[in-house]
Amino acid sequence: MNRDNPLVLGIETSCDETGIGIVRGSRLLSNTIASSMDEHARYGGVVPEVAARAHLEELVPMIRAATEDAGIRLEDVDAIAVTYGPGLSGALMVGVGAAKALAIALGKPIYAVNHLVGHVGADVLQTDADPGTEPLEYPTIALLVSGGHTSLLLVRDLVSDVELLGETIDDAAGEAFDKVARILGLPYPGGPQIDRVALGGDPAYIRFPRGLSHHKDMEHHRYDFSFSGLKTSVARWVEQTRDAGETVPLADVAASFREAVIDILLTKAVAACTDLGVPRLLLGGGVIANARLRELAVERTDAAGIALRIPPLSLCTDNGAMIAALGAQLIMAGHEPSTLDFGADSTLPASVIQG
């Protein structure tokens, strides 16, 4: 196996995206994604069984498309990397089974890796649009925000030392967007819809609560997140407004809700950087596509003297390229492959980088 510049195929099936990525060392060759979001939209959220079946249907076509896009043969790869957690159990099982089958059939080593750490790994990739990406410096704080995860990590080393500082104790930020969108009569997925409706809205129109931000919460939940109370507050405000016979100002409610979520996220992230003396913040996860979040992140980090890193948006959502990237980094750091006795782990801790 080429340990200096390994050719790695990554498989990501933790939720509703079937992602196949191919990298050579830190160079991105292919990032192929199939999403089953339209199927879940009928139900207003991700249905695990539907997601797993979609992965079964898409994996082989996506692998073929990825190898063609990268201009390689499947047998050329040096190793297979796969997400084995955290995520939806059934969806993870599909990817893990496919990765093991490929590894055995091709006689290649396999690396079982952590989905959350993979989001950090996306930042090391060099693309055609950004071929000169500066290496990721350590330590760094990583804020990962998606439909299923809202986590704050201290990354001392990508392949050997990741610590979970805090996470959501109820809804993830993406779930809160979906639920509030439903309250406002907007379709799934909620994030893009609220972002659209919030254009022209007043983010200061309503001061919605910032969960776990009060002084009494900070001792035990300084870096944790909570969005269920915020969601309930929006629901009550909308209900009271309608009961009073008034029209709900959708743009203002959407903008105010979005501002509350972003304020919570960035306040906690900047606090972690300041408290721990880490002048670097990395953003990852699908919710990073939110334009207002990126705008305020720049403002907050500039004001605090913190260097901000955001991978290309195509690498922020769940994808196989980030998994391949993490696998390649493990190989280049001299880590041994995983054995075949690992299984899907839906609650895998962020501190466990490789299985």
Image (cartoon, grey):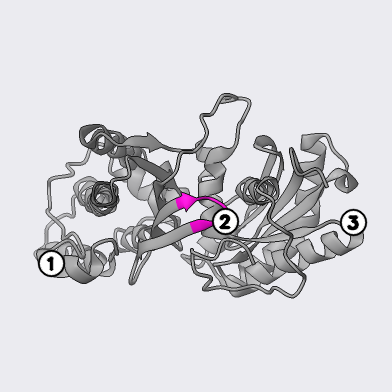
188 vs 50: above or below: above
Report the residue at 54% width, 67% height from top. Answer: 86
Q: Residue at x 56, y 47 (%)?
A: 121
Please name the residue shown 53% across and 55% down the image: 117
* Callout count: 3
Q: Quadrant of residue 182?
A: bottom left
How packed mark 1 is, by other alpha carbons closer than 10 Å (few <14, some 14-19, many 20 or more), is few
- Work out whether mark 3 precedes mark 1 in sequence or the reverse, and give the earlier one: 3
- Nearest the viewer among 210 and 322 is 322
Q: Is residue 182 left or right of residue 69?
A: left
Residue named by callout 2:
38
Q: Quadrant of residue 128?
A: top right
Answer whether residue 336 is magenta in the image. Answer: no
Q: Amino acid at mark 1?
A: Gln
The span picked out in magenta is: 156-161
In the rendered image, the vertical position of residue 127 relative to residue 4, given as above or below: above
Residue underneath mark 3:
106
